[in-house]
Image (cartoon, grey):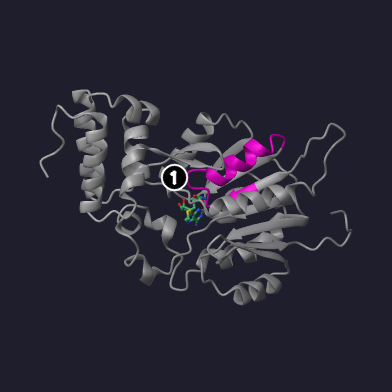
Amino acid sequence: MKGLPQTATALEALKYAIDFLAGIGIKEAKEEARAILKDGLGIDTLILYRDNPPLPSADVRKLNGILERRKKREPLQYILGFVWFYGLEIKVGAGALIPRPETEILVREALALAKKFRTDKNGKTRINVLDLCTGSGAIALALAKNLPDAEVTAVDISEDALGWAEKNRELNGAQNVRLLKGDLFGAVSSDQMNGSIGDRGQVRFGLITANPPYIKDRLIGSLEPEVSCWEPRVALSGGESGLFFTEEILRGAPGHLEPGGYLLLEMAGGTDAALLSGLCTQAGLLVENIVKDLAGWERVFIARKPDPAGVY
Ligand SMILES: C[S@@+](CC[C@H](N)C(=O)[O-])C[C@H]1O[C@@H](n2cnc3c(N)ncnc32)[C@H](O)[C@@H]1O
């Protein structure tokens, strides 16, 4: 295709974009084309259909540029530069995993569990939250905005991902999020934080959340090119079994949870939930719940640290 002619109207541009995207094998060509006109070119949908304005030549060039990037199977979210997640705008681009809608289930469950924690006489829920493998910061920010009195610590090993998380913290004005670079729980040793210190000098949290890399290495190559060629491997690769990080987190969680605290882990569709339950019990945690996503996959694994004093 030669590109959209300079004299096109907005509706001609929409039709051109749909045909272009369908022609390169994009399944959701119509939805993507509409998103490109609305969010990529800033054309209001009502104006598009009611007035069908001529497209300024700068927009024609911009649209042709976007479609050329999409032809290389760059994810649309990277091209547009953002996604919506739990009502928040989250900026994304090279180096950060694109937050997925199913991860909102983990946030919803975490917020429901947070209600079980102490609320002071002013109705404030003070709780220490740790989000491991934070990537763009989507989970940490959704929790921080909905729990304004919580202290949220967000950890990632990737400098690039943390760069996006920092942008998103600013964009969403979340003062109660602290970003740390490091390897899982290694980032929250007591010398890096001033939190409640447990018996072995570790910082303790009421809630620990994580959407860790969980794709089996041998399957990464067979994923859609938008994922396998563009999203960072460090965000995808869960080792041979896919469970490398999940197991590490289950092992480390008891030492970092307050008694009665919860661990919420996103898991790959099709993960052996019985295996995870066994690992959870071995680690000394109680299996609280396993929540399915809309497609029926077991998606969020929830464990609780026993609380001998029965405070929670
Ligand atoms: C599946 S992504 C999840 C991103 C984000 N939480 C979300 O749900 O959209 C996994 C993230 O784990 C990070 N990661 C990989 N290995 C890590 C490690 N050893 N310690 C901390 N973070 C790690 C990756 O950089 C990536 O950002």
Residue 47 lies, in percent from the top left, at: 36, 25
Residue 186 lies, in percent from the top left, at: 58, 54
Q: Nearer the viewer, residue 78 or 184?
A: 78
Q: Is residue 99 left or right of residue 266?
A: left
Q: Residue furthest front?
A: 50
33 relative to 233, above or below: above
62 relative to 219, above or below: above
Does the segment drawn in magenta span residue 141? yes
Does the segment drawn in magenta span residue 119? no
Q: Nearer the viewer, residue 256 or 43?
A: 43
Which residue does the image show at 89% across and 58% down from the upper left? 309
Residue with the mark numbered 1: 161
What is the quadrant of the N terminus in the image? Answer: top left
- Is residue 199 something one can see in this rendering? no
Assign a secondary structure to mark 1.
helix
Task: Give the quadrant of residue 192.
Answer: top right
**CB of mark 1 near ligand 1 (< 8 Å):** yes
Residue 124 lies, in percent from the top left, at: 79, 35
Disc 1 marks a residue whose amino acid type is: Ala
20 relative to 292, above or below: above
> Which stretch did the figure color magenta?
130-149
What is the quadrant of the C terminus in the image? Answer: bottom right
- Is residue 310 something one can see in this rendering? yes
Q: Residue furthest left?
A: 2
Q: Is residue 307 left or right of residue 14?
A: right
Which residue does the image show at 69% across and 34% down from the upper left? 148
Residue 121 lies, in percent from the top left, at: 88, 34
Which residue does the image show at 59% across and 32% down from the upper left? 174
Task: Give the quadrant of residue 46.
Answer: top left
Which residue does the image show at 56% across and 43% down from the upper left? 86
